[in-house]
Amino acid sequence: MSADPKSSFKSVPKKYHPRGFELLHEDLDIIVGNKAAGLLTVAALWEKEKTVHNLLNQYVRKGNPKSHKCVYVVHRLDQATTGVLVFAKSEKAQLFLKDNWRANKKTYLAIVHGKLKEKSGTVSSYLSEDEDYVIHSSQTDESGKLSHTEYQVLKETAKFSLVQINLLTGRKNQIRVHMAELGHPLVGDSKYGPKQAPYPNLALHSVKLELTHPFRGERMQFAALPPGHFKNLVDFNYQLCLNPGVN
């Protein structure tokens, strides 16, 4: 089912939403929002404050420095990736969501360079990270983690392809690495694509997330339109991707 705004914990005026994280749903157990580009999910060595995790901790404490309220990390999006992200409001909810994460449906939109020969398919390989935090893909090295990415081309232009992706496993940089492995790196990805990328924004967006609510047990679906730079690259009716019937 789609998330019903009426079932939210309360309606929060947009001006109180954490900057860079538009709230899509909140109840007693979870917070779901649409992450903007440039915002880390959690703290890194180079940035401790400008993270969704920190902003939501401040949000649930409502300015009370003595409050011990906090949110709990369930999954992550890369700093340059936009879209749907969920946090738990208790350790019990976090544990449930993490334990059942494989049963969730995670749908992304990506714009890649060129036209794919196969318009749909599944990329499978072992992914491992080196000491420079670069992810490598191998068909034979079983020391990595076996990863699967399902894709379908939605539209092509002279230069780009809009691709819908179902993330069957959730490894770091998985979509970026697998698309580059196909010879079609993501637009704006200077890490796994052209080093002198002329496009400043990474074209990767978590468009839809379907999960089981940790306490009500119902299936819920959350969706968010991609940022404007998607339409600037590939003109498409992105509302179609929010339809619960579109996988």
Image: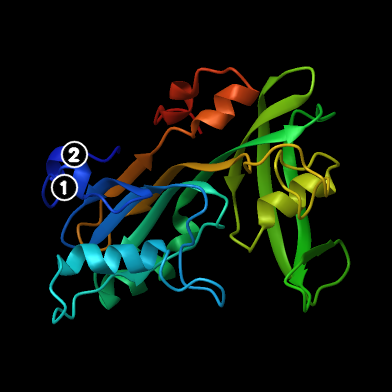
Residue occupying image coordinates x 66% and y 41%: 200
Q: Is residue 147 left or right of residue 93?
A: right
Residue occupying image coordinates x 81% and y 26%: 115
The image quadrant that residue 152 belongs to is: top right
Residue occupying image coordinates x 76% and y 71%: 128
The total of numbered circles placed on residues is 2
- Percent across and percent down for residue 239 are 43, 23
Residue occupying image coordinates x 31% and y 48%: 219
Q: Is residue 225 above or below residue 92?
A: above
- Percent across and percent down for residue 86 are 36, 57
Q: Amino acid at mark 2?
A: Pro
Q: Residue 220 versus residue 114: which sits nearer the camera?
A: 114
Badge 1: few (under 14), some or many (20 or more) residues near its Cα, within 10 Å? some
Q: Is residue 168 left or right of residue 54?
A: right
Q: Is residue 111 left or right of residue 96?
A: right
Q: Is residue 207 above or below residue 128?
A: above
The image quadrant that residue 126 belongs to is: bottom right
- Whole-number angstrom distance, CA of label 2 to CA of label 1: 5 Å
Q: Residue 68 versus residue 5: which sits nearer the camera?
A: 68
Q: Residue 96 versus residue 181: which sits nearer the camera?
A: 181
Indicate the quadrant containing the N terminus: top left, top right, bottom left or bottom right.
top left
Is disc 1 placed on a helix, strand or loop? Answer: loop
Whether tag 2 and tag 1 are in contact, CB under 8 A, the answer is yes
Identify the coloring: rainbow
Which residue is disc 1 drawn over?
8
Badge 2: few (under 14), some or many (20 or more) residues near its Cα, within 10 Å? few
Which residue is disc 2 drawn over?
5
Q: Is residue 228 above or below residue 25?
A: above
- Percent across and percent down for residue 48 are 45, 74
